[in-house]
Image (cartoon, grey):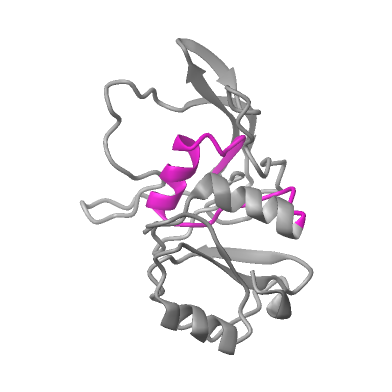
């Protein structure tokens, strides 16, 4: 991240290695500063645009954003200790597959959306023959006054045939930013806590 445009405080980070979004809003609703996660393959013209607009960015990965490396940079460069993900289904699916999630919060709303084009909480390529599903264990279940249900799950990963809850990955590899407790909102929440909002993707 160029030192001359580094901004202290809270950030909302966006994965955009292709440089597709021409940002105009740089501060979030809770005064978070915009931060773009890019890769070595991100067009230089887009990086120049970010510098001209004083939008900080971090380079993590070659062809696309390397999520474990990106989270480690957020921890080392910005001192981040808590991350809440609010991407679309591809990003939400990629984070647990990279073993970067400790908890998942889901608010079940009183509505059903059908159809083949309906957004998914977790999306991605099919699991390979040597990959295991990410395990969820409910640790908080709350019924809301409107009838909706909030559930917080601990995330577990299977290693060498044995299940383990979220924590430092095996083989001494650093997880980077740990996902800590995060208060649920009144809307659909998929938190890493992962928070769900439709429309973003991991490329």
x then y, percent, for residue 76: 72, 52
Q: At 57% from the left edge and 53% from the top edge, which residue is drawn?
A: 70
Residue 38 visible in the shown view: yes
Q: In which quarter of the image is the C terminus?
A: bottom left
Query: In the displayed image of the protein, which residue is found farthest to the bottom?
Result: 52
Q: Is residue 151 something one can see in this rendering? A: no
- Write down the quadrant of residue 153 in the picture: top right
Q: Report the label total.
A: 0
Is 101 positioned to the left or the right of 183 in the image?
Answer: left
**Membership of 110 in magenta stretch:** no
Q: Can you name the residue that lies furthest to the top here?
A: 161
Q: Height in image: 140 above or below 145?
A: above
Q: Which residue is drawn at 55% across and 44% down?
A: 68
**x, y percentage for residue 114?**
27, 51
Q: Residue visible at 48% across and 18% down?
A: 158
Vertical comparison of 34 with 52: above or below: above
Residue 155: image location, x then y, percent: 56, 29
- The residue drawn where x is 66% and y is 55% is 74
Stretch in magenta: 79-106
Q: In which quarter of the image is the N terminus?
A: bottom right
Q: Which of 114 and 47 is in front in this view?
A: 47
User: Where residue 44 sits in the image (x, y, percent)?
Assistant: 44, 78
């Amino acid at each position: 991240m160029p030192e001359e445009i580094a901004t202290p405080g809270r950030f909302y980070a966006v994965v955009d290695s292709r440089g597709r979004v021409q940002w105009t809003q740089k501060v979030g609703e809770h005064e978070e500063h915009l931060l773009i996660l890019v890769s070595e393959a991100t067009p230089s013209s887009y990086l120049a645009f970010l510098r001209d607009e004083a939008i900080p960015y971090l380079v993590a990965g070659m062809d696309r954003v390397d999520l474990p490396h990106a989270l480690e940079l957020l921890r080392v460069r910005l001192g981040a200790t808590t991350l809440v993900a609010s991407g679309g289904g591809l990003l939400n699916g990629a984070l647990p597959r990279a073993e970067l999630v400790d908890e998942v919060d889901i608010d079940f709303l009183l509505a059903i959306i059908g159809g083949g084009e309906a957004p998914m909480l977790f999306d991605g390529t099919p699991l390979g023959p040597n990959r295991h599903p990410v395990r969820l264990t409910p640790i908080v279940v709350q019924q809301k006054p409107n009838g909706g249900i909030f559930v917080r799950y601990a995330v577990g990963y299977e290693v060498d045939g044995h299940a383990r809850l979220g924590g430092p990955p095996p083989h001494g590899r650093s997880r980077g930013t740990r996902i800590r407790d995060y208060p649920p909102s009144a809307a659909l929440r998929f938190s890493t806590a992962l928070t769900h909002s439709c429309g973003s993707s991991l490329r």
